[in-house]
Amino acid sequence: MKGATSELKKLPAAFYATPGGNEPVREWLLGLDAESRRIVGKDIATAEFGWPVGMPLARPLSGGLFEVRSKITDGRISRVIFVNHDGWMVLLHGFVKKTQKTPKADLDLARKRAKEITS
C-alpha cells in the first residue's frame, strides 16, 4: 500500500533480492556503522525524491546503471549501484570504494543482477 511519502517519490527505491531471498545491499548497509548508514540512506532518499539528479550525488554508468555517491565516515566513500526498472530504483550492489575507478568486479556483479530483473 502506498503512503503519502511514497507517492511523492519520483523513483522509489527497492532492494534487489537474490533467488534465495537475500538482499545484498540491505545486508551491506547493516554492516556499516550507524552514521555511514544514515548518510547513505539520506543520499538514496534525495535521489528518490529528486530524480533525476546529477553530480555530485548520482551519475550514470554504462549499460543503464547508475550510482549514488556518498561520503561516509572516516574519509571513506561508498557507492550504491542501481538500475531504473519499471519506475523503481532497484538497489543492486553497495560497496566502499577504495580506488578512483569503480572496480570491474563490482560493475560486473551489478550488471549480472540487473540482467536478472530486466530479462
Image (cartoon, helix red, strand yellow):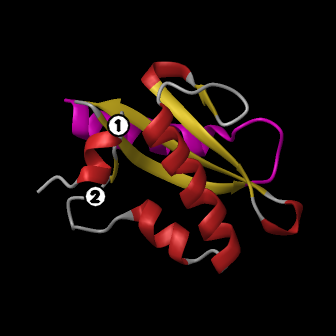
Q: Going 69% across and 74% down the picture, which residue do you hit?
A: 35
Is 76 left, or right, of 69 in this rendering? right
Q: Is residue 46 above or below residue 111?
A: below
Q: Going 66% across and 61% down the picture, which residue do you hit?
A: 39
Horizontal and vertical percent for residue 60? 57, 23
The reply to whether the C-beta atoms of the residues labelled 1 and 2 are less than 8 Å apart is no
User: How many angstroms separate mark 1 from mark 2 (CA)?
Assistant: 11 Å
Q: Which residue is identified by label 1?
A: 114
Is 1 left, or right, of 24 in this rendering? left
Crowding near pointer 1: few (<14 within 10 Å), some, many (20+)?
many
Q: Which residue is identified by label 2?
A: 17
Seen as rendered, the residue at the extreme right is 75
In the image, residue 117 lies in the stretch drawn in magenta: yes
Horizontal and vertical percent for residue 59? 62, 27
In the image, residue 36 lies in the stretch drawn in magenta: no
Is 54 left, or right, of 72 in this rendering? left
Within the image, what quadrant is residue 38 found in? bottom right
Split into 4 quadrants, where in the image is the C terminus?
top left
Three-letter amino acid code at disc 2?
Ala
Residue toward you, 118 or 55: 55
Which span is picked out in magenta? 97-119
Secondary structure state at the residue bearing disc 2: loop
Q: Is residue 63 above or below residue 15?
A: above
Q: Is residue 6 above or below residue 114?
A: below
Marked residue nearer the N-terminal end (1 or 2) = 2
Q: Going 47% across and 45% down the picture, which residue do you hit?
A: 109
Split into 4 quadrants, where in the image is the N terminus?
bottom left
Residue toward you, 77 or 39: 39
